[in-house]
Amino acid sequence: MKLLDRYLIRQVLWFTLLVAGALVTLAALFAFIEQQDDVGTGSFGVLDAFFVTMLLVPKQAFQLLPIAALIGALLGLGNLARGSELIVIRSAGVSVARVALAAAMGGCVLVVFGALLGEGLAPPLESYARQVKALAKYANLNYAEHAGIWLKDGPRVVSIEQQSADNLYGGIYVYELATGPDGRQHLTRIDHADSAALVQGKTWRLRNFATSALGADVVTTRRESTFLVQSDVSPDVLGAAVVDPGSLPIRGLYRFVAHLKANGLESRAWEVALWSRIARSLSTVLLCMLAVPFVFGPLRSSGAGSRAAIGIVVGVVYFLVNRTLENSGDVYGLNPLVVAWAPVGALALVTAGAIARVR
């Protein structure tokens, strides 16, 4: 059985590798085309667009791995079915459940590979890609990542604690610097806002705004519930300095959720991202097993094109249901565990029922 398991696992892994290569190539092509809108802005050129696209490849591979696993398992096991090898395996007394278990073993290998991509390689490369793009488009900016994220914009130093949405940022501090007669820079003003949101163009709305002007002998303070400010700093720039929940590794999400709960802050969006990331990784195993009832059933004599089409349809439907539930869960205040694990639970029931029906 060990020899048979290794043979089935090799089939699943080999075809998954081929499918993943094709899908990632297409995704990278679309990402490169998307970067063309920014070519010519500042010093951002075609080579920079290509470099940024390559940095994003590990993230794309991690996101596409579940769909690639399903299509790869369909193609790999389907290839054995067309060659009547699965019939011989069944004739030798091997059950459908045992074949599904071998496919699940291949899925476990893919989960480990995906963890290496999604947890170790993709997050730092994505962060670096954002910085490369922002620094090329806005040459007067530079970043530092010590004790939080800091952005220097000419005479201003901006501190950003977190990003809550695409154009919404929390915990904003702005330090205004001036150069004195001796040539040294000194602090002249400190601004703080609980949140900053882009209204339109270059106009930002700051909420719970407070400013302190530092004079020679006196400090002048002022507070406003809402304050509008004009700034050339765009969401593209800030997006390079902050990370949304979906871009953090599991350990980073776990630490941040613990931090939010310890301080009595809202953590639902981050909990959804944490549990969804774990659930999506484990769904790779179930998707590999889901291929088994197809190759023993209606797709036994079908070609590779039909199997690939079925895999794409099932994978896209599962992805859309997952994303819809994640987005609606935050809107309607659903439990993060339900939002993350409901699609996986449904997939597990469908897979078990389909395997049980195979004769």
Image (spheres, grey):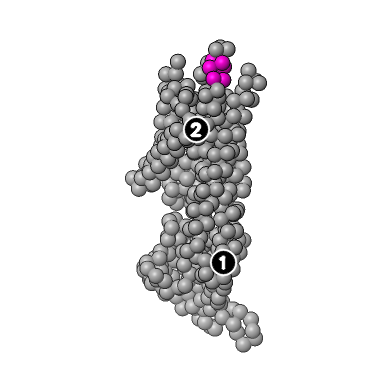
Query: Residue 17's quadrant in the figure?
Result: top right
Residue at the location (54% across, 83% down)? 216
**Residue tagged 2:** 304
Spot occupied by residue 114 in the image (x, y as percentages of width and height) = 58, 40
Give the residue pinned by disc 1. 45
Q: Is residue 77 visible?
A: no
Q: Label 1 sits on what residue type? A: Gly
Circle 1 SS class: loop
Q: Amino acid at mark 2?
A: Ala
Give neighbour class at mark 2: few <14, some 14-19, many 20+ (Cα, 10 Å): some
Q: Residue at x 57, y 17 (%)?
A: 89
Q: Nearer the viewer, mark 2 or mark 1?
A: 2
Q: Is residue 340 above or below residue 101?
A: below
x%, y% of residue 207? 39, 65
Query: Residue shown at 53%/78% (left/top)?
Result: 188
Residue 71 located within the stretch drawn in magenta = no
Q: Which residues are magenta?
A: 84-90
Left or right placement of residue 261 versus residue 139 in this view: left
- Please name the residue shown 54% across and 65% down the image: 134
- Most foreground residue, 109 or 265: 109
* Nearer-N-terminus badge (2/1): 1
Q: Is residue 89 above or below residue 67?
A: above
Q: CA distance from mark 2 to mark 1?
A: 40 Å
- Circle number at residue 225: none
- 268 vs 261, nearest the viewer: 268
SS at circle 2: helix
Q: Is residue 265 visible?
A: yes
